[in-house]
Amino acid sequence: MYLQLFLIAIGFVMLVKGADYLVKGATFVAQRLGVSYFIIGLTIVAFGTSLPEFIVGIISAFKGTTDIAVGNIIGSNMANMLLIVGIMAVLIPLDINIYAKKRDIPYALFSSMLLLFISIDVLLFGSGKNVISRIDGIILISAFVLFLIFVLSRSRDEIVDEGIYDANYKPSKALLFILTGVLALYLGGEIIVENSISLARQLSISEILISSTIVAFGTSLPEFATSIIAAYKAQCDIAVGNIVGSNIFNVLWVLGVTSIIIPLPLDGHLIMDMGLMVIATFTLLLMVYVGIENIISWPKGLTLLLFYAIYIAMLIIRG
């Protein structure tokens, strides 16, 4: 047990350093390409911090543990929106990018609603079971490609901020920062997840509960570390863009690819959790419009944290 705790601590160190390197490299890329930090956070950073969810999904698909693949994505997205954004908003008011308000958070909501819609086969078609089929996977991937087209089509319309990091960084150095950061994030996340699962099993916690809580939180640690460090460095656009982009990546890309590899059968609990994810995404969007426009302040952050606490309590009671 003590060795596992030590390895988890090592994993946290790797996450923090990896997040720092990834933010530095991504900021330089934004400066050199002349696109906004939010676009970089929405794409490059979001993809890098979604790697743990992607790896867990693929491994789960090949092993046939589809509950872990789906439960991890739902739990991770809930942690991203409620826990991470909630903590960031309590620490520092989040000024939400106008594109996030009008396009990206609504697209994240659309993604969650699309996932729920294609998953309720029993209700829609009267079939024997709910499943994310290979055709559903193709639909999710198509929506992901559409999202990338939207992002790239507007990338030149957004204004890049003046550089905070040294603009004399060579491209090779920026690439090294990004690759090192992504690698450290991935390895740190894997170390934490593996050892957390081992500890949980010693405590006789079910794997279904593990996938929605411990594994989900573990795979969300890269988003957490990256967003907190970006916010601390006054790069709120990268912080928020990373969260929104990661959620879209998780639903459309990760589950899309995973369900193409193997169809993902769903039980009633996962369908209910998808509904909660839709509600959580709508709540986040609503908060951007209510009160001080475009600002998620600390009272809203506390509300998100309360929502997350209720969600976790529900999972634990359900077992």
Image (spheres, helix red, strand yellow):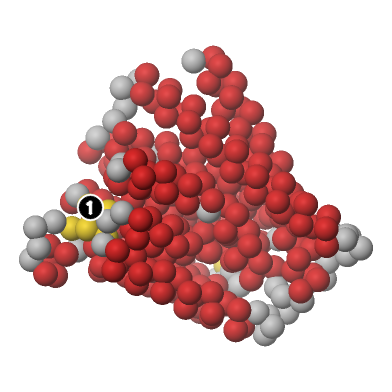
Rendered image quadrant of residue 9 = top right
**Up-down relation of residue 162 to residue 311 (above or below):** below
User: Residue at image x 76%, y 74%?
Assistant: 33
User: Residue at image x 41%, y 60%?
Assistant: 257
Amino acid on which disc 1 is placed: Pro
**What residue is pinned by disc 1?**
265
- Viewer-closest of 156 and 100: 156
Rendered image quadrant of residue 47 = bottom right
The answer, for residue 303, to whether it is visible in the render is no
In the rendered view, does 168 fall on the left or right side of 24?
Answer: right
**Up-down relation of residue 155 to residue 136 (above or below):** below
Which x, y percent locates residue 81?
A: 47, 56
User: Residue at image x 22%, y 52%?
Assistant: 266
- Viewer-closest of 209 and 87: 209
In the rendered view, does 238 fall on the left or right side of 199?
Answer: right
User: Residue at image x 64%, y 71%?
Assistant: 39
Which x, y percent locates residue 166?
A: 89, 60
Furthest-top residue in this view:
2
- Tell me the SS state at disc 1: strand
Which x, y percent locates residue 139?
A: 34, 72
Label 1 Cα neighbours within 10 Å, binned few <14 / some 14-19 / many ≥20: some
- Looking at the rendered structure, the number of numbered marks drawn on it comes to 1
